[in-house]
Image (spheres, helix red, strand yellow):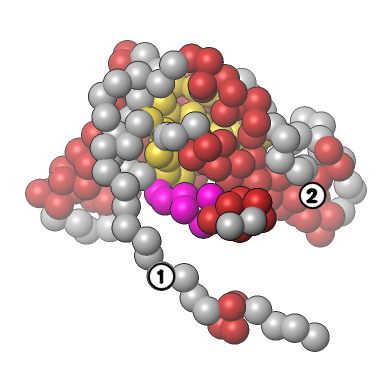
Amino acid sequence: MSQTEVYLNFLRSRRSVRHFLPEPVPQEIVERILETSIYAPSAHNRQPWRYVVVQSREAKLKLADQMGASFRRDLKADGVSEAKVEEQVERSRCRILEAPVVAVLCLDLADMDVYPDERRRKAEKIMAVQSAALAGGTFLLAAHAEGLGGVWVCAPLFAPEAVRQALDLPAGWEPQGMLLIGFPAKISEFRPRKAIGEVSRFV
């Protein structure tokens, strides 16, 4: 097998892992993952990603409880039954509490360009969001390279104020997602991808 094939197989072997062993992730590994993630490309090389790494039980509880309260309100407003509401909130809560490391990925627009018109302001923010997402994807690949499992959770987009209050975020940090990582208790099975012909055009 060529070196190229080895690299490609590695990239294709990453899975979204939601169940972790209880053992902690060594701090040096966490820091290596963060260091690798910031090599992701970014618009204008402004590097608008920011991380809050949540590892203590106390901080996870605060985050889970405040996000859970927001989630509960949304579900009730949607008319979901009380039993179903509590089931979904508890599942979300357990995911946060059981992950050895919860990295909350945020966006900071402070260093991005400022335009006088709405069209370019919107485009500039989208570029920044894309940049943060690239860092998050690189974070998950770095975790995979360290023998860890990980998953991207979008819940902070639906409860930004809850995340902001729970973690006392700086004013300019906008929550984008949570990256849950740890030693995998179970590896998810491969889920089929759409064929290249379905998602590509060659012109």
Please give the count of numbered marks on the rendered protein. 2
The structure residue drawn at horizontal position 48% and vertical position 14%, both measured from the top left corner, is: 27
The structure residue drawn at horizontal position 16% and vertical position 46%, both measured from the top left corner, is: 87
Q: Is residue 66 visible?
A: no
Magenta residues, start to end: 10-16
Quadrant that contains the C terminus? bottom right
Q: Tell me the distance, in whole angstroms, between the alpha carbons under discs 2 and 1.
A: 34 Å
Q: Earlier in the sequence, mark 2 or mark 1?
A: 2
Residue on which disc 1 sits: 192
Q: Give, as a three-letter code, the residue at label 2.
A: Glu
Mark 2, other Cα within 10 Å: few <14 / some 14–19 / many ≥20: some
In the image, which is nearer the foreground, mark 2 or mark 1?
1
Describe the element under mark 2 as helix, strand or loop: helix
Residue on which disc 2 sits: 124
The structure residue drawn at horizontal position 65% and vertical position 25%, both measured from the top left corner, is: 35
Describe the element under mark 1 as helix, strand or loop: loop
Q: Is residue 85 left or right of residue 77?
A: left
Quarter occupied by residue 1: bottom right
Q: Give, as a three-letter code, the residue at label 1.
A: Pro
**Magenta span has 198?**
no
**Magenta span has 12?**
yes
Question: Which x, y percent locates residue 8?
Answer: 59, 56
Q: Is residue 131 visible?
A: yes
The structure residue drawn at horizontal position 24% and vertical position 34%, both measured from the top left corner, is: 94
Is 180 situated above or below 57?
below
